[in-house]
Amino acid sequence: MILFCKVAVILGIESSCDETSASICADGVILSNVIANQTIHEAYGGVVPELASRVHQQNIVPAVQQSLLNAKVSKNDVDAVAFTRGPGLLGSLLVGVSFAKAFALARNLPLIDINHMQAHVLAHFIDDPKPAFPFLCLTVSGGHTQIVLVKDYFDMEVIGQTTDDAAGEALDKTSKILGLPYPGGPLIDKYARLGNADAYRFPEPQIPGLDFSFSGLKTAILYFIRNNVKLNPDFVQDNLADICASVEKRVVTILLNKLKKAAQQYHIKDIALAGGVSANTGLRQGLKQMGDDMGWNTFIPKFEYCTDNAAMIAIAGHYKYLKGEFARQDIAPLARMPF
Ligand code: KG4
Ligand code: ZN
């Protein structure tokens, strides 16, 4: 009983890909969210799993120390440790899971395992206003594109997903074709703001139901660039902003058209956006516009809670702590992890 009488302080740990992050949550309020980015991957045009794992090992202790400092909380005040169990890169997950286990074992604290994709959705419970159950969440990241029917904090159903590439992957691969550095998504966003989104028309895939496909679009962009560069070697430099704006517009319309279909099918008006790609200006504006037209209540987390972060792990940990659901010390990370 004592467990539920005092303010519960949760340490959250995220290390599923290339961000090492630690966060402190006290009674559902995020006090700190430290994110250490890994720049080493830029030289390789994508995340190198082995390097990511090594950099997590260097970053994890300083990130946790900084998160405690920023929150003005001592490690003695921590009541439970929440960590990303999966999905993600196994070597990266291992670092966060091992740290969480060691911290919990040394201080005799309960462990809370969190599904990274559920945590992206639960990022909506950090700040007000919060969506009401049931709501739909479009989760778009470098690894996932999903429409999730959220019935309760840990009762979620994927009702639509990509059959091949994720939306963020499509943007990152397009930026690679354009010769932009990794990660390209934010750069496409930056150049798109300066271009004409109707300059070029890329195809919209005809996928039945609520699923997505982005690999055809990626191939269409590749051939479009190749053909034009043959005619004008400076085609990309001369038209970069228009290309980025047109690509972004197509990706955004693919995402929003399916979201609209899902909202109509399930008769839901609380619509949320999550994952790294929800940082995209065109997608945020597009969702707001569609929300106004359709009479939806739309929810988009603060930028720092959109991309990978431990605050979403800590808030998810808070709700699992309230349910009294804890993990065993022999728990292992999972590269693939269903909801
Ligand atoms: O959720 P996240 O941080 O990591 C994964 O779990 O994948 O998402 C990363 C993805 C990358 O594909 C990145 O290019 C994309 O989010 N991204 C953006 C923007 N910021 C991040 N894509 C478009 N516009 C942005 N502003
Ligand atoms: Zn993510």
Image: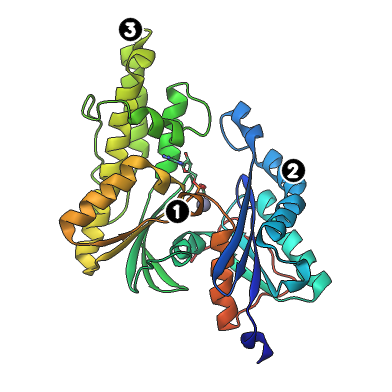
**In screen coordinates, is 68 left or right of 163?**
right
Picture colour scheme: rainbow
Q: Position of residue 61 (x, y in %)?
A: 77, 53
Disc 3, ligand 1: is the CB inside 8 Å? no
Circle 2 sits in a helix, a strand or a loop, which is it? helix
Q: Is residue 217 above or below residue 149?
A: above
The amino acid type found where label 3 is placed reads: Asn
Label 3 – label 1 distance at C-alpha: 41 Å
Label 2 – label 1 distance at C-alpha: 29 Å
Q: Position of residue 97 (x, y in %)?
A: 70, 61
Q: Position of residue 101 (x, y in %)?
A: 75, 66
Image quadrant in which you'd find residue 65:
bottom right
Confirm whether residue 147 shows in the render.
yes
Query: Residue at point 68% right, 73% down?
Result: 80
Which residue occupies the extreme right position in the image? 106
The amino acid type found where label 2 is placed reads: Arg
Q: Nearer the viewer, residue 223 or 9?
A: 9
Label 2 – label 3 distance at C-alpha: 43 Å
Q: Of the residues under marks 2 and 3, which one precedes in the sequence?
A: 2
Q: Is residue 103 above or below residue 199?
A: below
2 vs 1, front mark? 1
Q: Of the residues under marks 3 and 1, which one precedes in the sequence?
A: 3
Q: Nearer the viewer, residue 252 or 192?
A: 192
Q: For the N terminus, which image quadrant?
A: bottom right
**Residue under pointer 3:** 232
The amino acid type found where label 1 is placed reads: Lys
Q: Is disc 2 surrounded by few (<14), some (14 to 19) or many (20+) residues within 10 Å?
A: few
Residue 302's label in the rendered image is: 1
- Is the C-beta separation of discs 3 and 1 under 8 Å? no
**Residue under pointer 2:** 54
